[in-house]
Image (cartoon, rainbow, N blue to C red):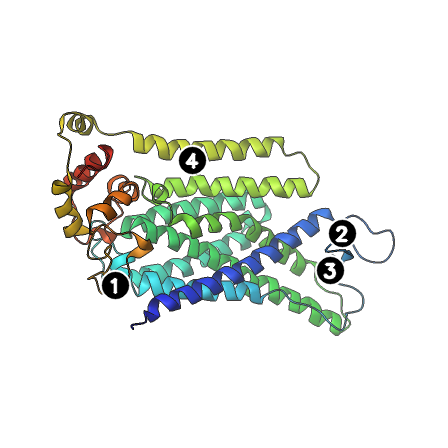
Amino acid sequence: MTVDWSEWLNLAIRWFHLTAGIAWIGSSFYFVWLDNHLVPPKEGEASGEVWSVHGGGFYHKQKYAVAPSKMPEDLHWFKWEAYTTWITGFLLLVLIYWVGAESFLIDPAKAQLSQAAAIAIGAASLVVGWVVYDLLCRSALGRDNRVLGAAWFAFLVLAAWALDRVFNARGAYLHVGAMIGTVMVANVFFVIIPNQRKVVAALMRGEAADPALGKAGKQRSLHNNYMTLPVLFIMVSHHYAMTFGAARPWLVLALLGLTGVAVRHVFNLRHRGEKTGRAMVVAGVMALVSVTYVSAEKATLPAEAKSTEAVAAPETWASVEPIFVKHCASCHAAKPTSEAFTAPPLGVMVDTYDHSRAAAERVKKVAVDAEIMPLGNMTGMTRAERDVLGRWIAAGAPQ
């Protein structure tokens, strides 16, 4: 019996990452909800309070805008949820996209990169992302969250476009997600937690805490709240080839990212008891535009391609089997011959007619429409070969 330790390691880290992410996002969303539901207290020095019921019990939460006059003996800090999420996410990025750069990151058709060069670009993108964001926050633009948000969004779109020029689309998507995730956890590590520690230290010395520290932490926390849904989309995007497989994947990412921001804004408004009609319309329009753009793009073929499809004879298994053998079966077989896999990725096999027919629609999405398989097109599949597969699938995958 052989054990694929890399796959088990991948599963363990991914599971840990998912668990930590749920804990981080859950606490983040809860505290934003809490802030948006606070009302002035009837008595005491707190700046706001809220009563709630859950699990058969009643809870009374109070918030102090700066800090209480007397520090409690037991104070809970929310930080390791964020740190653990980033650490496990970074390990996944290294394990899959950096160690496996030749398969999952480099696209020779876009740029002839060595593994070291690809890793260097990926690592630099994380650092540059944080530096640019932090400078924006500390600049005059940081005084208005709307202006700052627009500037940061524009930079992310530019980064997505630039990364798509040198990496395969899926790798570019994941690096944009890693950039945003790095900014979010850096907000916690470099701003939110240090500012809170300074406030606590001042109170312990019997001094008045600086309100600007809490304001800066609150701003970064709000930014994290709005960046959460775009990051979650990127985390699941690799399952949906029509997104990163589009002709302009960076534009699809921008549209769907804006949709996530709009949806988050709707919830924030609702939590504050404000009208959400306009925000819901914006979110709905963004979602409609995103879906329409991707669908319209895939439905539009060059005139010569349409005419070729119209006159081409139906393909048979005899004409597509050599294509599967040359470009796909080394990985997608019951017993892969590729050293990268010990089992067929995602359980998809094309080593026999029955297997290929069953996987036909998935093949169409990733190999014919999105053109993201084979990974990095290392085997050099041509557009003509993809068209053959497309005609065979359109005809019902005949034998």
Disc 4, disc 1: CB below 8 Å? Answer: no
When the figure is inspected, residue 221 is found, relative to residue 206, above or below; the finding is above
Nearer to us of marks 2 and 4 is: 2
Q: Nearer the viewer, residue 121 or 325?
A: 325
Residue labelled with disc 2? 52
Q: Residue furthest right?
A: 43
Nearer to us of marks 1 and 3 is: 1
- The numbered dot on residue 340 is 1
Query: Label 2: few (<14), some or many (≥20) within 10 Å?
Result: few
**Mark count:** 4
- Alpha carbon distance from label 1 to label 3: 54 Å
Give the amino acid at mark 2: Ser
- Can residue 387 be seen here? yes
Looking at the image, is mark 2 or mark 3 earlier in the sequence? 2
Residue labelled with disc 4? 290
Query: Label 1: few (<14), some or many (≥20) within 10 Å?
Result: few
Residue labelled with disc 3? 66
- Alpha carbon distance from label 2 to label 4: 38 Å
Looking at the image, is mark 4 or mark 1 earlier in the sequence? 4
Disc 4, disc 3: CB below 8 Å? Answer: no
Query: Label 4: few (<14), some or many (≥20) within 10 Å?
Result: many
- Alpha carbon distance from label 2 to label 3: 23 Å
Looking at the image, is mark 1 or mark 2 earlier in the sequence? 2
Disc 1, disc 2: CB below 8 Å? Answer: no
In the picture, the quarter occupied by the N terminus is bottom left
Q: Nearer the viewer, residue 20 or 110?
A: 20
